[in-house]
Amino acid sequence: MTPFNTLHGLVVPLDRANVDTDAIIPKQFLKSIKRSGFGPNAFDEWRYLDRGEPGKSNHDRPLNPDFVLNQARYQGASVLLARENFGCGSSREHAPWALEDYGFRAIIAPSFADIFFNNCFKNGLLPIVLPAETVDRLFREAEAIKGYALTVDLAEQTVTTPTGDTISFEVDGERKHRLLHGLDDIALTLQFTNEIKAYEARRKAEAAWLFA
Amino acid sequence: MTARTLYDKLWDDHVVHRQANGTALIYIDRHLVHEVTSPQAFEGLKLSGRKLWRAKTILATPDHNVPTTARAAGIVDPVSRTQVETLDANCTELGLNEFRMSDPRQGIVHVIGPEQGFTLPGTTLVCGDSHTSTHGAFAALAFGIGTSEVEHVLATQCLWQAKSKSMLVKVDGALPAGVTAKDIALAIIGRIGTAGGTGYALEFGGEAIRALSMEGRMTLCNMAIEAGARAGMVAADEKTIAYVEGRPQAPKGADWEQAVAYWRTLHSDAGAVFDAVLEMDAADIKPQVTWGTSPEMVLSVRDKVPNPADAPNAVKRADWERALAYMGLSAGTPISEIAIDKAFIGSCTNSRIEDLREAAVVARWAVANGRRVAANVKLAMVVPGSGLVKAQAEAEGLDKDFVAAGFEWREPGCSMCLAMNADRLEPGERCASTSNRNFEGRQGQGGRTHLVSPAMAAAAAVFGHFVDIRDLANKVLQ
């Protein structure tokens, strides 16, 4: 996994609550057996005016000019500013894969859906929860100021605005550690192999039916 | 000893290791695998040279991509076909138990797990699918995971978890005739919202939940994720035990006796403390119909489409406006005047035998009264949850009831719940659907989904618009 340390990135405001993972990456793209290449189809139904299909070239597809990601001023954005309950619905990890592949490295919202939130950390994508009033303010600033960029520092757990205002955020210590160092979860868990085997032996003795 | 919740008990019995920060390594007893969220996990396992931890904990089947017609011809879409063939190849290589597309036991993962006795009380069960919460109906700790975690379970049989908060959703009283578990689920989501359960493990309790069949409890737990809760659960009781007994993978002999003794302890202790409690009276619940693009946008069939001006705040107002525009609805329209183009009876929420029986009652009533699927309804399809559900329904003659009334009778799979196969809505089409998500584009780009119970979907198909199933119930169904 790509480590995450600091990020200075252009912010794109996606002003909708309850953005679901079906919207982030529609179902037809889930037929891929790879974990890369989803970026061009991130938000496909909002981003394009025609119907996207796996294998179809996206270069000449008609863009929806009303969709915020298509606006010239937000090209190259790496920070997604979102509303409450971002990433709800399907557990598809294709959603963080698509956002990461598009170029996002951090998502700021007042709240996230659990499974999506968890999936982000596995993919070098940092979900940041900030109070609704703070998110409101960032929306106002990002919409008002062209080229509005934020600096995210994971080690310090801060988001810094262009005027130098520093906002702190919470992150679970273990997740932070793994993301900072791009650690492999499975390798870490396998360090507990003896404990897992001991659990299995104990459980088998008290509940043989689980191992029949 | 302190009184514990059901969730506490399931958690405590699966902790392998506790970290100082409270997160724990949790042992996973059962792992369901389907073709969409597993290929990258199998590939990851192979690329890292790691071994599968415990093959016998896995049951695999293709469900999302499979066609519901002309199955003998195989899968026409080459991309879908590759994904299903990849699952077959991975299962063969690792020696996993897989019900292939041609197997009579194939079906939706969340239908076949319980059906086979693979889903058992007191277990932890995961799947790369958010509707894994379904299995909590068996007093199991069951939740959906992403593909990285699928790989993690394949390699270690464990997951790192932070313990959730607990919420008791207590539904007392008796459900009115015609009102189902689906309506309870939608009414709860309407009350607490799609993020109301975020961070919680839900336990459903109370008289109305005890009175539900196992199928009803599965429907309810299935929708826990639509309230934001990764896991929903119901305490084990005699119905749970009776449902499991004799199933192919259920414990046998002395194992059975030992298991049942343990299962009888799987309930929250008297005096157990929950972080939150929600109480509802079943008698107040009416047949539910969603009007928007989120399951929380739900009303009773007697209500009218809401006015965004009445939304509680600016974000919701914008949401409602966008939803009405997408759904092609105007504020103030009675729900019962909304005409549909298609009806879908199926999905991991409502494709079990009891669901099909409830819908078939409406089909039989239609035929007996000289009616059939309304002229404005282009397609009304019934997709059983598994090959075994299909066989059972056919043994009861339900397929003939459906076909006589103008419904199509299909092969099992996820089908038009998420339209990964050929079954989908075209832009602008409106559907009465027994599935679980009414998100934009969920059933096909531009498609408009209204979530309802099986009998409500069947009745909408017959009348061409939503009707209050209780009217039908009072007249005919009793």
Image: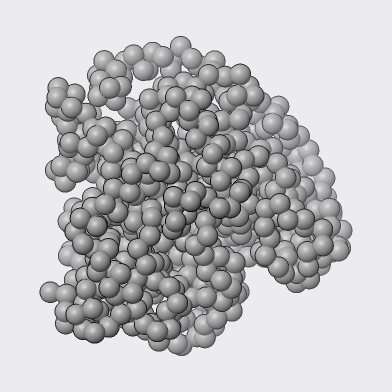
Q: Quadrant location of residue B355? A: bottom left
B294 in relation to A28, above or below: below
Determine if residue A41 is in view.
yes
Q: Nearer the viewer, residue A193 or B349?
A: B349
User: Quick check: A162 left or right of B413?
Assistant: right
User: Quick check: B286 left or right of B324?
Assistant: left
For image coordinates 79% across by 42% down, the residue present is A7
For image coordinates 47% across by 54% down, the residue present is B67
User: Quick check: A209 left or right of B125?
Assistant: left
A143 in relation to B337, above or below: above
For image coordinates 49% across by 62% down, the residue present is B423
User: Quick check: B278 left or right of A45?
Assistant: left
Determine if residue A137 is in view.
no
Q: Residue B287 at what x, y percent from top left?
A: 30, 73
Q: Residue B172 at what x, y percent from top left?
A: 20, 60
B458 in relation to B280, above or below: below
Quarter of the image with the N terminus of chain B in it = top left
